[in-house]
Amino acid sequence: MSVEDFFLKYGAFESQIPLSKQDFIGLIEIFPDLQIEREANGIISVMSPLKKGSGKRENRLNFLLNLWNESQGKGQVFGPNGTYDLPDGATKMPDVSWISPERWAEEPDDDESFIQVVPDFVVEIRSKTDRLAKLQQKMTNNWLANGVQLAWLIDPYKEQVFVYRQGKDVECVKGFDQKLSGEEVLPGFELNLMEMRAKK
């Protein structure tokens, strides 16, 4: 059984021994096809490969955000391989993210490094192997704590979305028969939640 097949069968894995940043970089160079994240304390998580439903939802949202971004003529959009070195020392890979031109202007001009600026907007889409509580913790402790302005945690299986905003309580939107707005962060962007539904 390959490493990829192991995580596909058994789901995500979290290490018990922290890794230094140098060792973490060495690990992802050995396994470039795996999505591996690192917490500020050195604990790493290996995500299981996406199945087709999850991959389709991520790809669709990425496409829609790119369309909006192209029409606005600004910002940078990254998919699930966009890797961020956050100010608190964590290294994270959101499913979809957007960086405003103002923040992108502060990004070092180095194509071979991880992204150093914090995105303005992130989306995490729960897959069946993801624990909801773990993702909720990630939204608060990693994304909002490091300066993300707007974040969506989409749960296709319970048809609910948790909306995170700086300085405000988390809002739970129930039911996919509606649209989500990008608000002031992404003016004019809307997501029809029916596109995020999981097949029953």
Image (spheres, rainbow, N blue to C red):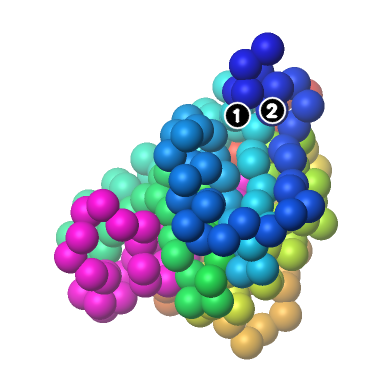
Instruction: Look at label 1 and name its amino acid.
Output: Pro
Q: Amino acid at mark 2?
A: Phe
Q: Which residue is mark 1?
A: 49
| Residue 167 counted in the magenta span | no
Whether pointer 1 and pointer 2 mark residues with C-beta atoms closer than 8 Å, the reply is yes
Q: Is residue 88 above or below residue 134?
A: below
Q: Which residues are magenta?
A: 96-125
- Answer with mark 1 or mark 2, whichever residue precedes in sequence: 2
* Residue under the point 63% across and 23% down: 3
Q: Please count the marks in the image.
A: 2
Give the residue at mark 2: 7
Label 2 SS: helix
**Mark in the foreground, 1 or 2:** 2
Position above or below: 60 against 107: above
At x 43% / y 39%, what residue is drawn? 29
Quadrant location of the N terminus?
A: top right
Q: Nearer the viewer, residue 87 or 162?
A: 87
- Residue that sits furthest to the bottom in the current view: 167
